[in-house]
Image (cartoon, rainbow, N blue to C red):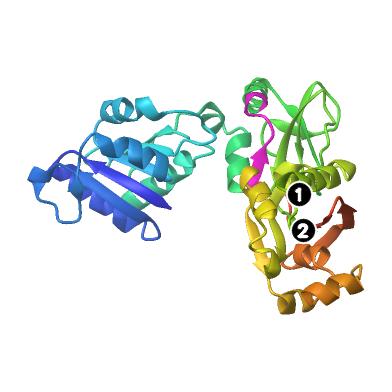
Amino acid sequence: MRAALFAFSRGGCATARRVMAALPEAVFVCYTMERFGEPAFLPLDKAVYGVCFSAMDALIFVGACGIAVREIAPYVQSKKTDPAVLCIDEAGRFVIPLLSGHIGGANALAEKLAEKLDATAVVTTATDVRGKFAVDAWAARHGCAISDMGLAKAVSAAILEGNIPLCSQFPLPSPLPEGTFAGETGSLGIFIGWRARTPFARTLRLIPRVLRVGVGCRRGISAGAVENAVQAVFAENVLDTAAIRGVYSIDLKQDEAGLLAACERNNWPVHFYTAQQLRNVAGDFTPSDFVRSVTGVDNVCERAALLGAEKLIVQKTARDGVTVAVAAEHWEVRFG
């Protein structure tokens, strides 16, 4: 975690040092007034707030909440992208998550810091206060994409009013979270899985990012051809593209402009393996003598997808000069 610490008094600097000691795994950049002569702190000026807001995972203000609110206000955009923002009083008695309590992890960070500092976490989000299922916080903790943030808000409101149905392509552990019950019908509900299913009239999908897409392609392929091939395979197999963990291929393709452009446009991390690494992958694959003659391995897309995954769920599919295969990593639903 990358975090920025802001202190506005000598006592605040002392508390900031306690925060750093409490989170040794974090990388901190600390700011305070130059007149305090704190050697581990950079000079504080207005410009740093915007820079830190866009670059850091968390912003921690040691001082009054009002200072934090005024300084971050111009930069607040979306709960999907805003960093966690917390405020700690100068004495270190209270830790208050101000922004991105769930997806950004501010609530969890506040609880952790409160325990380390022997302080009190002041959490105000309704689902947490009432012990109900917070879908956005759960999704963030378990590496899931949220299909629709507006629908997530509606689901949270419904959970606060009563119980809503929840289903999954994976086995559901017992007990289910407070505010949910097992079911696959209704006007509003939650589906957990990488299948593109909508069992409810309004379905909030929580999508684990565990699908590895193996890609092979001819030289000079266009970005559009790669995108169309991947999207077609996912549509044909009822898979959600939000579940894509990354795109995987052979290192001969690491300078393939169309492949790289398609991955960049869709925010798909791209990884490359050597022919030897691909040959070492165990399994039954669709062989090609031509592919072997060019790359040194009988199949690129299936082997690349399966390397690091649990099972191949879509075998080699060819489309307009692109071959696509999909493998799934091991994943299971866990609550609590």
Frontmost residue, 115 versus 134 = 134
Label 1 sits on a secondary structure element that is: helix
Asked if residue 4 can be seen in this view, the reply is: yes
Q: Residue furthest front?
A: 220
x 43%, y 45%: residue: 57
Region of the chain picked out in magenta, as a range:
143-151
Where in the figure is residue 42, as x and y percent of width and height? 20, 49
Mark 2 or 1, which is nearer the eye? 1
Give the vertical position of 174 relative to 278 (above or below). Answer: above
Where in the figure is residue 177, as x and y percent of width and height? 68, 38
* Image mark count: 2
x 61%, y 32%: residue: 132
Give the vertical position of 221 relative to 197 (above or below). Answer: below
Q: Earlier in the sequence, mark 2 or mark 1?
A: 2
Where in the figure is residue 268, as x and y percent of width and height? 65, 50
x 30%, y 58%: residue: 21
Q: Tell me if label 2 and label 1 are in contact, CB under 8 Å.
A: yes
Is residue 148 covered in magenta? yes
Where in the figure is residue 43, as x and y percent of width and height? 17, 45
Which label sits on residue 209? none
Quadrant of residue 56 within the rendered picture: top left
Q: Amino acid at mark 2?
A: Val
Q: Amino acid at mark 1?
A: Val
Frontmost residue, 24 versus 111 = 24
Which residue is disc 1 drawn over?
226
Q: Is residue 295 left or right of residue 141?
A: right
Frontmost residue, 321 versus 51 = 321
Is residue 318 covered in magenta? no
Which residue is disc 2 drawn over?
215
